Image (cartoon, rainbow, N blue to C red):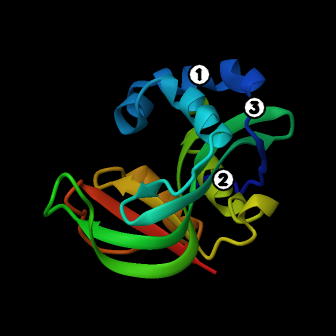
Amino acid sequence: MPVPRDVDLRPFVPKQLAAVRAWFEHPEVRHRLGGPEWPERALSLQQRAHDDEEFRGQRVLRSHTWLAWDGDTPVGFLGGDVYDRWTTWDGSDPDHAVVHHVEEGPAMGSAYVVDPARWRQGYGTAILRAWMTPRETADVRLFALGVDGDNVASARCAEAAGFAASSEEPDWEDTVYFLLRR
């Protein structure tokens, strides 16, 4: 059983790339999220204007990325977009999202990575709990994580942090969304 942990989320900045790049080389992380280009992409998304950019029926308001720290040690990465609302959709039209449910926002969807050397130590749950604390998320009403249907470890972290699965079965993309409302 992992020891309960606390982490601090601090904004992710370019000089920290070297500290996290290797995490994204791990085969499991690469399988779930892609390779080491992920943190660079997150930095570029933070810096660009989102003028009326839409993603599956949601308007992107802003992007945020943080490193999670245990004291002076980076232990995880968390980042994503804040949307004007939360939507659910189906895969009936592969070229356009077919939205069938809308919930008032702001809502934030994120992905997270724990340093693979620190897996099974409680950091995933700690990172997800800390997600609600930065001033950048003070207005967010709904937090969402898309978890691959076979990613038992991430699903357990989400549940331990207070998130609930929005459905029992994965959707058309083999994703289960875990939501936390405040």
Q: Circles 1 and 2: CB distance less than 8 Å?
A: no
Q: Earlier in the sequence, mark 3 or mark 1?
A: 3
Judging by the rendered image, the residue that carries numbered circle 1 is 21
> Looking at the picture, how far across and down is residue 21, in whole percent?
59, 22
**In the depicted structure, whether residue 129 falls above or below residue 112:** below
Horizontal side, residue 43 vs residue 177: left or right: right
Judging by the rendered image, the residue that carries numbered circle 2 is 127
> Looking at the picture, how far across and down is residue 73, in whole percent?
79, 32
Is residue 164 visible to the viewer in this orientation of the structure?
no
**In the depicted structure, whether residue 55 falls above or below residue 36:** below
Identified at 75% across, 69% down, the residue is 138
**Picture quadrant of residue 83:** bottom right
User: Rounded to the nearest whole Å, what is the CA distance between mark 1 and mark 2?
Assistant: 18 Å
User: Rounded to the nearest whole Å, what is the CA distance between mark 2 and mark 3?
Assistant: 18 Å
Is residue 8 visible to the viewer in this orientation of the structure?
yes
Judged from the image, the secondary structure of the residue bearing numbered disc 3 is loop
Judged from the image, the secondary structure of the residue bearing numbered disc 2 is helix
> Looking at the picture, how far across and down is residue 35, in whole percent?
44, 25
Judging by the rendered image, the residue that carries numbered circle 3 is 13
> Looking at the picture, how far across and down is residue 162, in whole percent?
57, 72
Q: Earlier in the sequence, mark 1 or mark 2?
A: 1
**In the depicted structure, whether residue 176 falls above or below residue 11:** below
Horizontal side, residue 71 vs residue 15: left or right: right
Q: Circles 3 and 1: CB distance less than 8 Å?
A: no
Identified at 15% across, 59% down, the residue is 93
